[in-house]
Image (cartoon, rainbow, N blue to C red):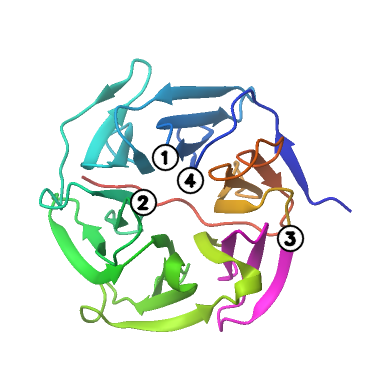
Amino acid sequence: MTLWRKIDRDVRDTLGEGALWSARDNAFYWVDILAPALNRLSLSDNTVTRWDMPARLGWVAPRAEGGLIGGFQDGVANITLDPLTISDRNDPEPHLPGNRMNDGKADRHGAIWCGTLEMAEENAIGTLYRLSPSGDWQVIDSGYTVPNGPAFSPCGQWLYHTDSALRTIYRFKLDERGAPHSEHDREEFIRFSEEDGYPDGMTTDAEGFLWVAHWDGGKITRFAPDGTRERSIELPAKRITNIAFAGENLDRMFVTSASKGLPESESDGALFEVESGVTGNPAGVYLG
Protein backbone atom coordinates (compact mmCIF):
# COMPACT_ATOMS: atom_id res chain seq x y z
CA MET A 1 0.00 0.00 0.00
CA THR A 2 1.35 3.44 -0.94
CA LEU A 3 1.48 5.70 2.12
CA TRP A 4 2.30 8.92 0.31
CA ARG A 5 1.07 11.21 -2.45
CA LYS A 6 2.92 13.97 -4.22
CA ILE A 7 1.44 17.45 -4.10
CA ASP A 8 1.20 18.50 -7.75
CA ARG A 9 2.77 21.89 -8.40
CA ASP A 10 4.81 23.51 -11.15
CA VAL A 11 7.93 24.27 -9.10
CA ARG A 12 10.32 21.77 -7.54
CA ASP A 13 12.26 23.14 -4.56
CA THR A 14 16.02 23.32 -4.70
CA LEU A 15 16.19 22.99 -0.92
CA GLY A 16 12.73 22.59 0.60
CA GLU A 17 12.75 23.07 4.38
CA GLY A 18 11.09 24.86 7.30
CA ALA A 19 7.85 22.83 7.44
CA LEU A 20 5.16 24.70 9.40
CA TRP A 21 1.42 24.29 9.98
CA SER A 22 -0.58 27.45 10.68
CA ALA A 23 -4.04 26.78 12.12
CA ARG A 24 -4.76 30.52 11.95
CA ASP A 25 -4.19 30.56 8.19
CA ASN A 26 -5.42 27.00 7.54
CA ALA A 27 -2.23 26.60 5.56
CA PHE A 28 1.01 24.67 5.42
CA TYR A 29 4.12 26.79 4.92
CA TRP A 30 7.59 25.76 3.84
CA VAL A 31 10.66 27.48 2.40
CA ASP A 32 13.01 26.91 -0.49
CA ILE A 33 16.23 28.08 1.13
CA LEU A 34 18.32 28.44 -2.01
CA ALA A 35 15.71 29.90 -4.39
CA PRO A 36 15.14 31.76 -2.04
CA ALA A 37 11.35 31.56 -1.62
CA LEU A 38 8.48 31.05 0.81
CA ASN A 39 5.67 28.64 -0.16
CA ARG A 40 2.12 28.33 1.18
CA LEU A 41 -0.29 25.46 0.55
CA SER A 42 -3.84 26.53 1.40
CA LEU A 43 -5.84 23.61 2.77
CA SER A 44 -9.04 25.48 1.93
CA ASP A 45 -8.60 25.20 -1.84
CA ASN A 46 -5.28 23.28 -2.29
CA THR A 47 -3.64 26.22 -4.06
CA VAL A 48 0.09 26.89 -3.70
CA THR A 49 1.43 30.45 -3.52
CA ARG A 50 5.13 31.23 -3.76
CA TRP A 51 6.88 34.47 -2.77
CA ASP A 52 10.43 35.34 -3.77
CA MET A 53 12.54 36.29 -0.75
CA PRO A 54 15.36 38.88 -0.63
CA ALA A 55 17.83 36.51 1.06
CA ARG A 56 18.17 32.84 1.91
CA LEU A 57 15.36 31.87 4.28
CA GLY A 58 15.80 28.83 6.54
CA TRP A 59 12.52 28.73 8.50
CA VAL A 60 9.34 30.55 9.44
CA ALA A 61 7.18 30.52 12.58
CA PRO A 62 3.86 32.21 13.42
CA ARG A 63 3.81 35.42 15.44
CA ALA A 64 1.17 36.04 18.09
CA GLU A 65 0.68 39.57 16.71
CA GLY A 66 0.03 38.21 13.22
CA GLY A 67 2.17 37.25 10.28
CA LEU A 68 5.35 35.24 10.54
CA ILE A 69 8.89 35.53 11.83
CA GLY A 70 11.55 34.16 9.49
CA GLY A 71 15.18 33.15 9.83
CA PHE A 72 17.12 34.78 6.98
CA GLN A 73 20.76 34.56 6.01
CA ASP A 74 21.40 37.79 7.93
CA GLY A 75 19.12 37.34 10.95
CA VAL A 76 15.44 37.12 11.85
CA ALA A 77 12.71 39.44 10.56
CA ASN A 78 8.94 39.81 10.72
CA ILE A 79 7.10 38.82 7.54
CA THR A 80 3.60 39.79 6.45
CA LEU A 81 1.95 38.51 3.29
CA ASP A 82 -0.62 39.90 0.86
CA PRO A 83 1.11 42.33 0.39
CA LEU A 84 4.59 41.12 1.23
CA THR A 85 6.54 43.19 3.76
CA ILE A 86 9.73 42.25 5.63
CA SER A 87 11.09 44.13 8.64
CA ASP A 88 14.70 44.95 9.50
CA ARG A 89 16.84 42.02 10.64
CA ASN A 90 17.82 41.04 14.19
CA ASP A 91 21.14 39.29 13.54
CA PRO A 92 22.98 37.30 16.23
CA GLU A 93 26.05 36.88 14.02
CA PRO A 94 26.93 40.13 12.22
CA HIS A 95 30.59 39.14 12.64
CA LEU A 96 30.02 35.95 10.56
CA PRO A 97 28.71 37.11 7.15
CA GLY A 98 29.41 33.67 5.69
CA ASN A 99 26.86 32.05 8.02
CA ARG A 100 23.10 31.75 7.61
CA MET A 101 20.05 30.47 9.50
CA ASN A 102 19.23 26.85 8.72
CA ASP A 103 16.31 25.51 10.75
CA GLY A 104 14.16 26.78 13.59
CA LYS A 105 10.85 26.56 15.46
CA ALA A 106 8.86 28.30 18.19
CA ASP A 107 8.36 26.47 21.48
CA ARG A 108 5.35 26.37 23.80
CA HIS A 109 6.80 29.27 25.82
CA GLY A 110 6.85 31.66 22.87
CA ALA A 111 10.60 31.55 22.18
CA ILE A 112 12.40 30.59 18.97
CA TRP A 113 15.06 27.86 18.79
CA CYS A 114 17.24 28.07 15.67
CA GLY A 115 20.61 27.06 14.33
CA THR A 116 23.17 28.74 12.10
CA LEU A 117 25.73 27.21 9.76
CA GLU A 118 28.58 28.23 7.53
CA MET A 119 27.16 28.32 4.00
CA ALA A 120 30.20 26.45 2.69
CA GLU A 121 29.50 23.71 5.30
CA GLU A 122 33.23 23.21 5.76
CA ASN A 123 33.81 24.45 9.32
CA ALA A 124 31.96 23.70 12.55
CA ILE A 125 31.14 27.33 13.37
CA GLY A 126 27.35 26.98 13.61
CA THR A 127 25.47 27.77 16.81
CA LEU A 128 22.17 26.75 18.41
CA TYR A 129 20.34 29.82 19.73
CA ARG A 130 17.22 30.57 21.75
CA LEU A 131 15.54 33.88 20.86
CA SER A 132 13.38 35.21 23.70
CA PRO A 133 10.08 37.04 23.12
CA SER A 134 11.92 40.24 24.10
CA GLY A 135 14.35 39.73 21.21
CA ASP A 136 17.39 38.65 23.24
CA TRP A 137 19.68 35.91 21.92
CA GLN A 138 20.94 33.09 24.17
CA VAL A 139 23.70 30.75 22.98
CA ILE A 140 22.61 27.20 23.84
CA ASP A 141 25.34 25.19 22.11
CA SER A 142 28.05 25.73 19.50
CA GLY A 143 30.44 23.90 17.19
CA TYR A 144 27.85 22.72 14.64
CA THR A 145 28.53 22.06 10.98
CA VAL A 146 24.89 21.52 9.86
CA PRO A 147 22.41 22.15 12.71
CA ASN A 148 18.93 20.75 12.09
CA GLY A 149 15.67 20.07 13.87
CA PRO A 150 14.71 21.34 16.32
CA ALA A 151 11.77 19.42 17.81
CA PHE A 152 10.11 19.39 21.24
CA SER A 153 8.65 16.48 23.19
CA PRO A 154 4.93 17.01 23.93
CA CYS A 155 5.66 16.64 27.66
CA GLY A 156 7.92 19.70 27.40
CA GLN A 157 10.88 17.90 28.97
CA TRP A 158 13.10 17.47 25.91
CA LEU A 159 14.50 19.45 23.01
CA TYR A 160 15.80 17.36 20.11
CA HIS A 161 18.47 18.85 17.87
CA THR A 162 20.82 17.51 15.20
CA ASP A 163 24.21 18.00 13.69
CA SER A 164 23.47 16.39 10.34
CA ALA A 165 27.14 16.31 9.34
CA LEU A 166 27.85 14.03 12.33
CA ARG A 167 24.75 11.87 11.63
CA THR A 168 23.81 12.53 15.26
CA ILE A 169 20.59 13.61 17.00
CA TYR A 170 21.08 15.14 20.43
CA ARG A 171 18.60 15.93 23.17
CA PHE A 172 18.64 18.61 25.83
CA LYS A 173 16.67 18.36 29.07
CA LEU A 174 14.47 21.42 29.63
CA ASP A 175 13.17 22.95 32.85
CA GLU A 176 9.62 24.15 33.52
CA ARG A 177 10.43 27.47 31.80
CA GLY A 178 11.50 25.67 28.65
CA ALA A 179 15.20 26.48 29.12
CA PRO A 180 18.10 23.99 29.30
CA HIS A 181 19.16 23.03 32.81
CA SER A 182 22.64 24.30 31.94
CA GLU A 183 24.43 25.54 28.85
CA HIS A 184 25.92 22.85 26.61
CA ASP A 185 23.95 20.21 28.56
CA ARG A 186 23.32 17.81 25.70
CA GLU A 187 23.38 14.05 25.31
CA GLU A 188 23.66 11.88 22.23
CA PHE A 189 20.25 10.35 21.51
CA ILE A 190 20.32 8.68 18.07
CA ARG A 191 23.17 8.09 15.63
CA PHE A 192 22.47 7.30 11.96
CA SER A 193 24.39 4.70 10.02
CA GLU A 194 25.87 5.47 6.61
CA GLU A 195 23.00 3.53 5.02
CA ASP A 196 20.49 5.81 6.79
CA GLY A 197 21.91 8.95 5.22
CA TYR A 198 21.85 12.06 7.42
CA PRO A 199 19.22 13.13 9.97
CA ASP A 200 17.57 16.36 8.83
CA GLY A 201 14.34 18.08 9.97
CA MET A 202 12.23 16.55 12.72
CA THR A 203 8.91 16.72 14.51
CA THR A 204 7.15 14.85 17.31
CA ASP A 205 3.70 13.28 17.37
CA ALA A 206 1.10 13.34 20.12
CA GLU A 207 2.41 10.05 21.52
CA GLY A 208 5.86 11.52 22.04
CA PHE A 209 7.54 9.69 19.16
CA LEU A 210 10.15 11.53 17.09
CA TRP A 211 9.82 11.63 13.29
CA VAL A 212 13.06 12.28 11.40
CA ALA A 213 13.69 13.10 7.72
CA HIS A 214 16.58 11.23 6.05
CA TRP A 215 18.75 13.35 3.73
CA ASP A 216 20.30 10.92 1.22
CA GLY A 217 18.16 8.21 2.80
CA GLY A 218 14.88 8.60 0.91
CA LYS A 219 12.59 8.03 3.88
CA ILE A 220 11.23 9.24 7.19
CA THR A 221 11.55 7.25 10.42
CA ARG A 222 9.56 7.21 13.64
CA PHE A 223 11.59 6.72 16.83
CA ALA A 224 10.17 5.86 20.25
CA PRO A 225 10.85 8.17 23.22
CA ASP A 226 13.69 5.83 24.24
CA GLY A 227 15.33 6.19 20.82
CA THR A 228 14.41 2.78 19.37
CA ARG A 229 13.32 2.70 15.73
CA GLU A 230 9.60 1.98 15.41
CA ARG A 231 9.13 2.15 11.61
CA SER A 232 10.20 3.87 8.42
CA ILE A 233 8.22 5.09 5.40
CA GLU A 234 10.04 5.08 2.07
CA LEU A 235 9.56 8.05 -0.29
CA PRO A 236 10.46 8.49 -4.00
CA ALA A 237 12.84 11.39 -3.32
CA LYS A 238 16.41 10.92 -2.15
CA ARG A 239 16.90 14.04 -0.05
CA ILE A 240 14.06 14.28 2.47
CA THR A 241 14.38 17.43 4.55
CA ASN A 242 11.53 18.19 6.97
CA ILE A 243 8.20 17.04 8.42
CA ALA A 244 5.14 18.71 9.97
CA PHE A 245 1.65 17.62 10.98
CA ALA A 246 -1.17 19.79 9.65
CA GLY A 247 -4.93 20.06 9.36
CA GLU A 248 -7.71 20.80 11.82
CA ASN A 249 -7.07 17.53 13.66
CA LEU A 250 -3.28 17.53 13.10
CA ASP A 251 -3.68 14.21 11.30
CA ARG A 252 -2.16 15.22 7.95
CA MET A 253 1.60 14.92 7.58
CA PHE A 254 3.52 16.96 5.00
CA VAL A 255 7.13 16.21 4.06
CA THR A 256 9.54 18.45 2.14
CA SER A 257 12.49 17.43 -0.04
CA ALA A 258 15.39 18.86 -2.02
CA SER A 259 16.64 18.59 -5.58
CA LYS A 260 20.01 20.21 -4.82
CA GLY A 261 22.86 18.26 -6.37
CA LEU A 262 20.59 15.73 -8.08
CA PRO A 263 19.60 15.12 -11.73
CA GLU A 264 16.24 16.63 -12.68
CA SER A 265 13.35 14.37 -11.68
CA GLU A 266 9.62 14.43 -10.93
CA SER A 267 10.06 13.67 -7.23
CA ASP A 268 13.26 15.25 -5.91
CA GLY A 269 12.27 18.66 -4.55
CA ALA A 270 8.58 17.74 -4.38
CA LEU A 271 6.20 18.19 -1.46
CA PHE A 272 4.56 15.00 -0.18
CA GLU A 273 1.59 14.17 2.01
CA VAL A 274 2.20 11.00 4.02
CA GLU A 275 -0.29 8.71 5.76
CA SER A 276 1.29 8.34 9.21
CA GLY A 277 -1.68 6.95 11.15
CA VAL A 278 -0.98 9.28 14.10
CA THR A 279 -1.60 12.91 15.04
CA GLY A 280 0.85 15.68 15.78
CA ASN A 281 1.23 18.57 18.21
CA PRO A 282 0.27 22.23 17.72
CA ALA A 283 3.00 24.50 16.38
CA GLY A 284 4.51 26.97 18.82
CA VAL A 285 3.86 30.69 18.36
CA TYR A 286 6.51 33.37 18.80
CA LEU A 287 5.41 35.94 21.38
CA GLY A 288 7.81 38.66 20.25
Q: Which mark is residue 33?
A: 1
| Mark 3 / mark 2, whichever is N-terminal | 2
The amino acid beneath tag 4 is: Glu
Can residue 133 be seen in this snapshot?
Answer: yes
Write the residue at 23% across / 42% down: 76
Regarding mark 1 in the picture, which secondary structure is present there? Answer: loop
* Disc 4 and disc 2 in contact, CB within 8 angstroms: yes
**Residue under numbered circle 2:** 102
Regarding mark 3 in the picture, which secondary structure is present there? Answer: strand
Q: Residues within 10 Å of mark 4 (few under 14, many from 20)?
A: many
Q: Position of residue 127 (x, y in %)?
A: 25, 63
Q: Based on the picture, tell me whether residue 226 belongs to the magenta stretch.
A: yes
Q: Nearer the viewer, mark 4 or mark 1?
A: 1
Residue 135, relative to residue 138: is it above or below? above
Magenta residues (range): 205-233
Regarding mark 2 in the picture, which secondary structure is present there? Answer: strand
